[in-house]
Amino acid sequence: MILPGAAYTEKSGTYVNTEGRVQQTRPAVSPPGNAREDWKIVRALSEVLGFTLPYDSLREVRLRLAQVAPHLSGVDQREKPTLTSVGLSALAAAHKGAKPSSTPFSPIIKDYYLTDPISRASQTMAKCSAAFSRAKDTAQAATA
């Protein structure tokens, strides 16, 4: 099943940027064809499934969102992160008294240029990978 969702430029939205600032957007253009805002699709789907959601407007959706996640109603305000808000309290408690390791970090991705099937099929990315590998080997030889 394909649902005709509008692109982000075609709908109102609430986003949190990398700074933690809540931002709301308005449509820049009308959605093409049968495309609809996501909340309208979910609302219509809920009706078809027999569990109709009680939202008939974007305003009602945003009011409910403010109940569930109050910080999302603070448009253009930045929420200061705390250990609790980012889920680190439990992690800190679980590792209380742990000492840092002397083992150096090692990269998880061994070859950035070949991380997905499309890149692995690309002759250009294969050349980048080979050049990266040669540069890495040269750097390791220089430090040895």
Image: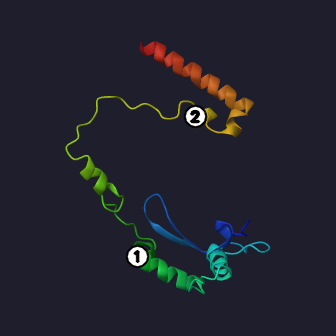
The crowd level at tag 2 (other Cα within 10 Å; few <14, some 14-19, many 20+) is: few
Q: Residues within 10 Å of mark 1 (few under 14, many from 20)?
A: few
Q: Dot 2 corresponds to which residue?
A: 112
At x 47%, y 17%, the residue is: 140
- Which of pointers 2 and 1 lies earlier in the amino acid sequence? 1
Q: Return the residue found at the far left.
A: 97
Query: What residue is at 26 percent from the left and 49 percent from the top?
Result: 94
Tell me what residue is drawn at x 68 percent, y 28 percent: 126
**Image side of residue 75 versus residue 46, left or right:** left
Left or right: residue 82 versus residue 21 is left
Look at label 2 and name its amino acid.
Tyr
Looking at the image, residue 37 lies above or below residue 127: below
How far across and how far down the image is residue 89, in percent? 28, 56
In the picture, the disc for residue 23 is none
In the rendered image, residue 116, in percent from the top left (x then y), is placed at 64, 39
Q: Residue at horizontal 64%, vertical 23%?
A: 130
Q: Is residue 63 left or right of residue 25?
A: left
Image quarter in which the N terminus is found: bottom right
Q: Secondary structure at mark 2?
A: helix
Picture quadrant where residue 3 is located = bottom right
Q: Is residue 10 above or below residue 142?
A: below
| Location of residue 16 in the rendering, given as x and y in whole percent from the top left corner | 48, 65
Disc 1 is placed on an element classified as helix
Q: Is residue 88 left or right of residue 37?
A: left
Between marks 2 and 1, how big is the CA–CA gap? Answer: 39 Å
* Residue pointed to by mark 1: 70
